[in-house]
Image: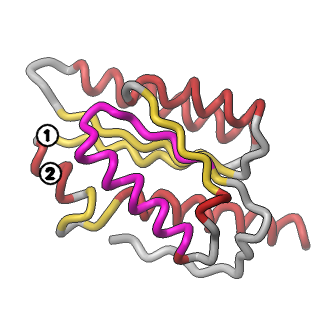
Amino acid sequence: MLDLPTLPLSTTGLSIAIVVSRYHADITDALAEGAKQAFIDAGGNESQLIIIPVSGAWELPVIARALLEEAKVDAVIALGCIITGETTHDQVIAHAIAQGLMNLSLRYGKPVSMGVLTCQTFEQAMERAGGDCGNKGTESMNAALSTISTIQNQNET
């Protein structure tokens, strides 16, 4: 698991959106719970979270964009799970989602953290949703909070 640098961050006044795919809900629910708990562990209050369920991972960028445009959010955590099938369809979807989320982050100057698992098997996904490989939802929230802190510290200097 990646240890991120600890930067002083007050979660006071922050509003974070968690957009979570309903496809492979057993996995994505665990990712969302990890993200929510990471925010609370950082001193945040659950009332500061906006949790939006979406049909699948493909819908994550468009909902993230709507939240960045219309809601007063400081970051978006995009959570989903793509499992390889018999074709390369998973690669096409994963690449498009990653590009879409990165473009949003750059356009709006706010973290759009990608917690979309791209695994070969359901078991691998479960390991990354709270198993031996940690929880990528937790890591995504921590990365977003660290990025917010870095931006805030940069603006203060």
**Circles 1 and 2: CB distance less than 8 Å?**
yes
Q: Is residue 27 above or below residue 34?
A: above
- Which is nearer the eye, 93 or 20? 20
Residue type beneath disc 2: Gln
Q: Is residue 32 magenta?
A: yes
Q: Is residue 77 left or right of residue 121?
A: right
Q: Is residue 86 above or below residue 121?
A: above
Residue 64 image position (x, y, % from top left): 60, 34
Residue lying at 55% horizontally and 71% vertically, measured from the top left: 40
Residue 39 image position (x, y, % from top left): 55, 67
- Which is nearer the eye, 73 or 3? 73
Residue 45 image position (x, y, % from top left): 63, 68
Residue under label 1:
120
Residue type beneath disc 1: Gln
- Which is nearer the eye, 49 or 93? 49
Residue under label 2:
124
Q: Splitting the image into 4 quarters, where does residue 11 fall? A: bottom right
Other-residue count near label 2 (Cα within 10 Å), few / some / many at <14 / 14–19 / ≥20:
some
